[in-house]
Structure formats: structure tokens, C-alpha cells
Image (cartoon, coloured by chain):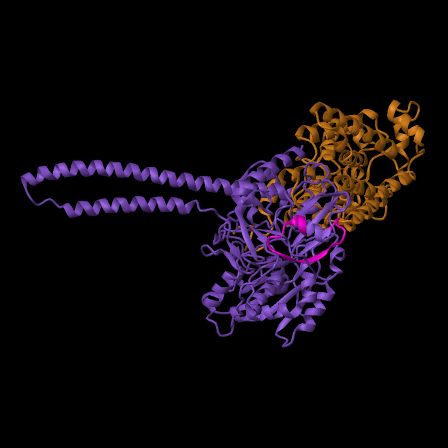
Chain colours: A orange, B purple
Amino acid sequence: MNGSPYILSERNSVTVVMLKVLAALVPGIIAHTWLFGPGILVSLLLCGAFAIGFEAFILLMRGIPLKPFLSDGSVLVTAALLALALPTLAPWWLYLTGMFFAVVIAKQLYGGLGQNLFNPAMVAYAALIVSFPVYMTQWAAPQYLANHTPTLLEAFDLVFSGGGSISPDAYTSATVLDTWKTQARLGKAVAEIRGLPIFGWAGGRGSEIVALMYLGGGLLLLWNRVITWHIPVAFLVGIAATAGVLHGIEPTRHADALFHLLSGAALLGAFFIATDPVTAASTPRGKLIYAALAGFLTVIIRTFGGYPDGVAFAILLTNVAVPFIDAYTQPRVFGHRNGGKT
Amino acid sequence: MNRKLYSFNGGIHPEGHKDVSSTTAIRSMPLLARYVVPLRQHIGTPARILVRAGDTVLRGQPIAAAEGYVSTAVHAPTSGRVIAVEARPVPHPSGLYDLCVVIESDGLDQAAEFLPMDWKALDPSALRNRLRDAGLAGLGGAVFPSYIKLNPGAARSLDTLILNGAECEPWITCDDRLMRERAGEILQGVAVMRHMLGARQVLIGIEDNKPEALAALRAAVVDGEVEIVAVPTVYPGGAGKQLTYTLTGRENPAGARSTDIGVQVFNVGTAHALYRAVILGEPLLSRIVTVTGHVARPGNFEVRLGTPVRDLIDAAGGALAGASGEVVGGPMMGFDLEDRSAPITKAVNCILVKDRAHFPERPPALPCIRCGACARACPARLQPFELYWFSRAKDFGKAQAYDLFDCIECGCCSFVCPSHIPLVDFFRFAKSEIWEREQHKSGADQARARHEFKEFRLEREKQEKSEKLAAKVAENRAKDAPADLQAQAKHAILQAAMERAMKTREGIAPRNTEHLPPAVEQEIAAIEARRHAAEATDH
């Protein structure tokens, strides 16, 4: 028996929250399919299936009822985010390994839903990029660059048996951030790099459209009050400010702020990854500090680090600081002077 | 009219369901054969019994008198015979029994003599004592003895007197109907309050979902000295501190009284009761109670205190088929009624009969995902999910450091939680647990102080014996022993020991717990049970 209140906000549950997040990803997924081919659908499907498999397996081992926890939808969000962060058309075991890290290591071994310190999808991404760097840089080429964009059936074939006759060069290419990194290392100037066909009006040709779709989905989440403005705004401001300063100092070497905002996982991260409530800071001021720090680290890692994109590492690093940030940013309680203490 | 209003953090917008009970006029109830009147109907010390079984009483005759400072009198709701003074079920979350006077009605309903009070001429202190003897207590639910709150203190004046007609709880409409039908009487009570407190301004805050009540009061205001303010409909806009903030922008400092910020808040029902007590001389014998939900003829009733809930539900046409229990109070802050024979008391503003369609079983709780929905809804600007983790882990020190005792248990967090965690249950549990521990500790400290003093006394006696012996020896040798000095030293040692004991006792005085009613002790058992239930649903 429970005490009051005896009423609940209608249609509000963890499942609804997670379904809203998944729905907000749909515009990005459609754009991705349209611009890069149906490969993404294969990786989404595989990640989802593996995720449910691992989750069910661990829940069974822990003796926890399957139904409420499988139907909460959280594992599908993790799966979707990892699938969108990974190259499509990679071998099936890459997705399997990724979901193992995400669901088993990063989520369930910490105690399951709500207990993990680190964003599961980002733990998996970090583990994969450290372990399999080659596979992680072979992204499906945008349709306008590819000699041939694999159909859905061919995508399945590629994922499960390596495709046989088709050479990976025919359908993969480096990402914009990757290209930027290698070209900048070669000492090429910004203007020269920006002239390459993979670049669009601000970020990567094609991928910038996908990024804008994530932005649109993110605004839907904001409008639906699934997330608050603090994290996306602070994260993007953190990126823009850091990139802007670097670009201002050496405009010939460092890309501008808009490029950083529209390439890689910046917008996906801002609205869908950094906002993961379990692993993000929770106080209003804490969210601003946490996300601005993540944005700053993202550009620093992109610019000076060894990996092309820095979103995953930046978020994991700031995840570590969350308990500390939260402890020192408690809001002023009603009737108290400051800091929530009398 | 164009007063600047302030909005507090969070709050929720649950379905009101007000029109279920607000469309019909206040009804009276037939005289019953039996009334059960508890002696503890207010916050503070239970009233002291004045009657014995076999005594005959008149309507309005005191049957129990105020005992100590925080207390107030209790009166017979009708004329008849006292047939028992015994423990009976009372409307309390614990479901425990409490001492009640059972009165068998003689059917005549003969009234004692009611003497109106000459409130303008009467000495303020004498007037307050008469209000105490009239049994006045806050009818908004807190039932704090009103005469104490009507003391302006040394300042002799007050900046703002607020009348609370917000009635933010869903389903409840007793204040709404009272304001619609008896606006003039309320304002007469308010005039007395204003006089007693020397209030500079008077504001009546009413949520804007009650246009008829707003209009009725506005029409009844004669001198324009009272401002009727429509406040936004947001739960818990009628909580004292929140309404004060909405109307004045002033936050009641934690652990302080509202008078520290120049504000005193009364429920409109209390003003009406004050009118009856002062102008008519009639003590508090009845109150308006909403009976709503799954009953045949929901509405509001003028109910004599001591009326068994069962009879009240019958007066509303009885519960409909499929009723799933009764709630005392509203759905946000009320509690389950254990026994329908429990009587209506000064604190009961609503009997809500539940059904499964409107009040479904709370789904099993999932783990907290720290989404912060609770924090966004919290009118006290707390972080309920943090308090939840601490309460669950029984890390009560941390819970207190995160200001658990600023929680007003409004239920907003539990209402919005997507994981369906009964957060408020955890907070009630943690509070009572902390309270109990403090009690334990102060008990233990007292015992230790007693023990130490005993040791000290034994030691002193031993010393005194040997000193006497030595003195005798010395007396035999010379007669110049400084006995006075020794006595002084002894006295100083004793004094120091007493001071130490006092200090330790003061040091452990419970922080933040001053506002807990003494009845909490009885609640502990119930909360313990709830905690087990909550823990069971938590996994």
C-alpha cells in the first residue's frame, strides 16, 4: 500500500520518455538513409537485436523480471545511439562487441537502469575505436561520392559476409573530421581542405543535413519537455566558443565554429547523448558546467587528440565529474539563503 | 487587481474534478443518535477532559479544555448524555485509536448559552483566551490553535494578513462553497483578525478556477480595505508558504515563522469560524466537509465535529458500487481511512471515495533515472531524487544536509515521476526515522547525564565522608580549617557538571524538526509498515 498522492501524471513513464527519444531520432535516420543508403537500417536492426539479447540475458542471470525492464525502452535508445555513432556496413561482430560493452559492461555490471556512471553508448564507442580503429573509420560514402551505394540486401550481405566481390573502397570513405585531421597533418590550409568534394556548405556534404535533422529532433525533445535547454545549449556554446577561439588565433589551421557544430556527433551529442539523464549532471547550473566542459573537450580532442571525433571521450570524461559538479551546484532551497544550506 | 504576482518553482496541473462537488449548495445533515468527539483535534497537547460517562451535556458546552499553551478546547456537538470516554478509531494516517468522548444525542439539540464577544472593547489577551476556549483551530488542515496565531507579539502590528482561499487540492470544494455562500460572514471574521493583528493590508488569495467565489467575495467587500486576489491555478498554490510567495514575493525563511517576514496566513474557513465564535458567541462545533468521488450525491456538508464518516457518506447518498476505499483530505496529500466509524474532526476538509478508474493502482516502481522531473516540479526547490537515494540508503545525515525537512510533502514529485517511485513515502519514512533517532538520542543523553551525575554524587559523598573524617582529625589538631572554601569548590564542580549535561542536551536538540507534530510517535509504526511496502515495490 502506498500513501498519497493517489494520482499520477497521465501517460508519463520511463517507456514514454524513451519512445519520445527514439521518435526524435527518426528525422536523422531518414536523412541518413536517403543520403548514405539503407546500410544504417541494418546496423540499427542489429544493434537493437543484440541489445535486447544482452539485456534479457543479464536480467535473467540477475533474477530480475524481464517485462518491466525490457519494456522500459532504455536499451533501445542505447542501441540506436550506438548504431548512429558507428560506421554502417561494418562487420556484424563489431555491432555485437559494441552492444556487449554498452549493455553488459557499462550498464548492467554497474547495476542496470539508472545506476551506470558512464553513458553506455559512449563506453562502447570508445572501446571499439580503441580496439578496431580501421573498421571505425570506414564509413559508408555519401551517395554522391560512391561508385555504388549498396542496396538493403547488399548491405546485409556486406555486414554478414564481407560482401565478397565488392571492394570496400567502392562504398566507403573517410568522414569529414577524419579527412580534416589527415589533411591538416599534411599541412594543408583550411581553404584548400574545404575545397575537397566531401565538404559541403558548412560541414560534410550530406552529413551536415543529417546533423541538422538531429537538431530538429532535439528541438522536438525540448518542446516535449523530455530534456531542458541547459545541456544542448551549453554543449554547443562550449564547442562554438572553443572552436571560435582556436579559429580566431590561427584561421589557416583550425576550422571555424560552424564546421565543428555541423560535423561529427556534435548535434547528436548535444541533444541525445550528453542529455542522458542517468549520466549527466542534474542541477540547472551543474548541467551548464557539465555540458560546456564536454563541448570544450570535444573540440580540444578533435583538434589536438589522436582521434577524429572527440564527443565520446569528452562526454565520458565529464561523466566522471558529474557527482562532483552536482554536489557543488545544488540550487537554493525555498526559504534558504544560498547553496541549499541554512 | 493589478497586484504583481510571483510564481514559485515547479508545481503541477492535475485534473481538478472540482465540479463534481461544487455545483450544489452546502447541505446540512440530520441530527445523529451518536457523536464521537476526539480530544486531539488540533496540533499540540490534547485537550483535558471535563466530563465523565453519565454526564449530560448541552450543545456547545465544553467537554475538554485547552491543556497548556499549544492546545484548544473541544465542545459537545449536540445535547445529550456522555456514554463513554474511551479510545476510538480517529482519522489519522496511523489508523491508531485516540481518546474520544462518545455522546448519545437526546434529540433536543439544546444549546448552551452563547455569549458574543465585544471584540473591539475586549482586552486582546482576554479575547484570545476566549477564542482558545471556543476551540478555534486552523481549518485548512494544519489545525494549529488560532488564538496563538492571532497574537501580534511585541510588534503589535503585522504587515500583511493573508486569507487562504486557494484550495489547490483536486476534488476539494469546501472553501469554494463557503466563499460563494458566506462571503460576508468570512469578511466579518477577517475584520476581527485584522483588528487583533493590527494588519496593514489584507489579501484574500483565491485560485482563478473559482470565479464564483472571487465574484462573491468581491461583491461582499464594503470598505475596499480587503484585496481579493485571483492567483494562478497551480498545485500547491494553496500551501501557506507558496501562497505567501505568490502574493508578496517573500520567502518564509526555513525554520522561521511567517510573522518573521510580516505575514500571517489563515484559511477562509477559520475566518468564518472566528466570525461565529466572536459575533455569535458559538464555539467551533461544525465545519464544511466535501464528500466527493464515487458517491451517489457528492457535495458539501455542514458537518458537526464528531460525526462518523460512515454517516456523512450515507448523507451523500452512499458509496457507489466499485468504490475502492476512502481518502481523508485530497488525492495529493490525504491519507487512507482505515475505519469508517472514525469521526470528522476539525482537520478533515474532505472525504474522497475512490474508484479504480480515477485512482488506479500505482504501477510498480522502476529505478530512478535521475531525469530531474521531480526537481522541476518541486515547489520547495529541492532535489527529490537525491533525497530519494539518501533516504533509500538510510543515509539520513545526507538527507538532512540536502534539506529533507524543507519538504512539505505536497506530492508533486511522486505525481510526475516517470519511474512511478512513491517519493513522498520515502521522505515521510526518512523524516520519522530521523525524528525517532533524535528522540532516542536525547533519551540516551538524559540517561547518561543522570548516570554521570549519580557517579559524581557517589564520589562526592565518599569525598565528603573522608573530608569529614579529615576535618575531625584536623579539628582535633587545630580549629582553622577553611570549610567555606571547600564548600564553594564543591558547588563549582556540581555547577560545571550540570552545565556540561545541559550543553550536551542542547547540542543534540533536533535541527529542523520543530514543526513535527507530537503525534509523530504514533505515526512511526505506520510509516514502518509503509516503508516495508515501499521497499517491496521498489524491486
Question: Which image quarter: residue B431?
Answer: top right
Report whether residue B151 is seen. no
Of residues B69 and A208, the one drawn nearer to the viewer in this rendering: B69
Q: State which region is magenta.
A: B293-311
- Where's residue B141, x and y in %? 60, 54
Whether residue B185 is in magenta: the answer is: no
- Where's residue A231, x and y in %? 70, 47
Report whether residue B337 is seen. yes
- Where's residue B258, x and y in %? 54, 60
Q: Is residue B113 left or right of residue A274?
A: left
- Where's residue A141, x and y in %? 88, 36
Question: Which image quarter: residue B225?
Answer: bottom right
Q: Residue furthest left?
A: B477
Whether residue B306 is in magenta: the answer is: yes
Q: As displayed, is residue A80 above or below residue B75?
A: above
Q: How many tags in the picture?
A: 0
Q: Residue furthest bottom?
A: B223
Q: Is residue B367 left or right of residue A332?
A: right
Q: Is residue B507 left or right of residue A105?
A: left
Q: As displayed, is residue A311 above or below residue B139?
A: above
Residue in view at x 65 percent, y 76 percent: B222
Of residues A87 and B92, the one drawn nearer to the viewer in this rendering: B92
Give the quadrant of the C terminus of chain B. Answer: top right
Give the quadrant of the N terminus of chain B. Answer: bottom right
Residue in view at x 40 percent, y 47 percent: B506
Residue in view at x 27 percent, y 44 percent: B494
Of residues A308 and B185, the one drawn nearer to the viewer in this rendering: B185
Of residues B145 and B303, the one drawn nearer to the viewer in this rendering: B303
